[in-house]
Amino acid sequence: MTRVTTDATTAATQRGEGVEDVALVPEQDGSELTLHTLRLGSAAVATVGADEADTLLFAVEGSGTLSLDNEHHALARGTAAHVPAGGRAELHSGPEGLTCLAMTVGADVDLHAPLGTTEPVVQLHEVEPGKATGSRSFQVLYGPHNGSTRATLFVGYIPPGRAPWHYHLYDEIVWVFRGSGALHLGDVVEELAEGSAFRLAPREVHIVENRQEHAELAVLGLFTPAGSPSAAYLPPDVAGTYAFAGTD
C-alpha cells in the first residue's frame, strides 16, 4: 500500500471561488492529525479553523495575509500560524496567489502543560535552531512554549545518509519542505520529493533517508502529544549496534 502522497497524486476539491483543497493526509481512525494543501488563486479568500480541532498553517508559496482576532498578519513562504479550536481565521491571497498547508489536531489528544502564551504567527527565519543528536537539527515553530499544547510543529534538517531503524512514541505527519530522499518502512521503500507527505503511527519503525550527496533534506513535521522532535527510540535489535544520530 502506498504511504507517500503528493498534490499531483491526490484529487483537489473546490473550497469556494478560487480556492482548491487537497487532502494530502486525510482523516484516519486512531489519529487526530490531518494535512491539507490550500491553493488560493489571485485575490481569493478562504476561512480556516474548526470548533473542536486546532489548526496550524504553514505558507509554502506566494503571499497574502491572515486575519485573526481582528489583527492582520503578512504571510509568505516560511510563515506559520496557529488557530486554536473554536477560532476562525481568514486567508487572503495576494496578486500571485497563495499556497498554504493546513494541519488539524483533534480534541482527543493528551495536552502538554502550557509554557507560554499563544503567538498567532511565527516566521521560520526568526526561530532559533535546536540541536538533535548527531548532525541533525530542527526549528520548533509551535509547541507548548508558544500556545500549542496539543501538538508540536517543527522543521527538521537531515544530512545526507540515513539513521538506523527507530520509532517515536508520538503520532506524526511529515511533509517534505526541501530536497529528496526515501521513506523506509519494513521492506517497502518509497521515494520522497519536495511536496511529498506521509503519516507515521506511534511506535512505527522507520527510516527517512536523505539520498542527496551535498544538501540537507528539510521536512516539516507535526506530532502529538507535543514535546521534543528529537525524542526517538531504537528497537532492541538495533539499540546495541548503533549510536542514534537523528530525529526522522
Image (tube, grey):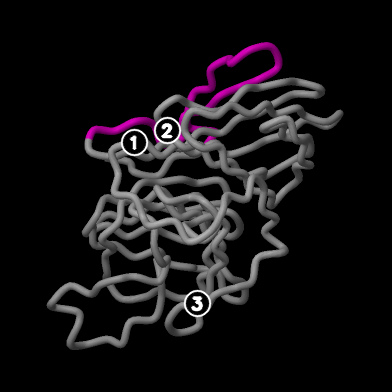
Question: Nearer the viewer's eye, disc 1 or disc 3?
Answer: 1
- Rounded to the nearest angstrom, the CA distance separating label 1 from label 2 is 6 Å
Amino acid at pointer 1 = Ala
The residues bearing labels 1 and 3 have C-alpha atoms spaced at a distance of 31 Å
Q: Residues within 10 Å of mark 1 (few under 14, many from 20)?
A: some
Quarter the C terminus occupies: bottom left
Amino acid under label 3? Answer: Arg
Q: Which residues are magenta?
A: 7-29
**Residue type highlighted by circle 2:** Ala
Q: Earlier in the sequence, mark 1 or mark 3?
A: 1
Query: Label 2 crowding class (10 Å Cα cut-off): few <14, some 14-19, many 20+?
Result: many
Mark 3 lies on residue: 136
Residue at image mark 1: 107
CA neighbours of label 3 inside 10 A, class few (<14), some (14 to 19), many (20+) = some
Residue 229, located in which quarter of the rendered image? bottom left
Location of the N terminus by quadrant is: top left
Is residue 202 within the magenta segment? Answer: no
At numbered mark 2, what does the secondary structure look like: helix, strand or loop? loop
Residue 57 in percent (x, y) is at 59, 41
Vertical order, 73 against 209 (above or below) = above
In the image, 19: left or right of 49? right
State the residue at coordinates (41%, 67%). 228
Q: Residue furthest top?
A: 17
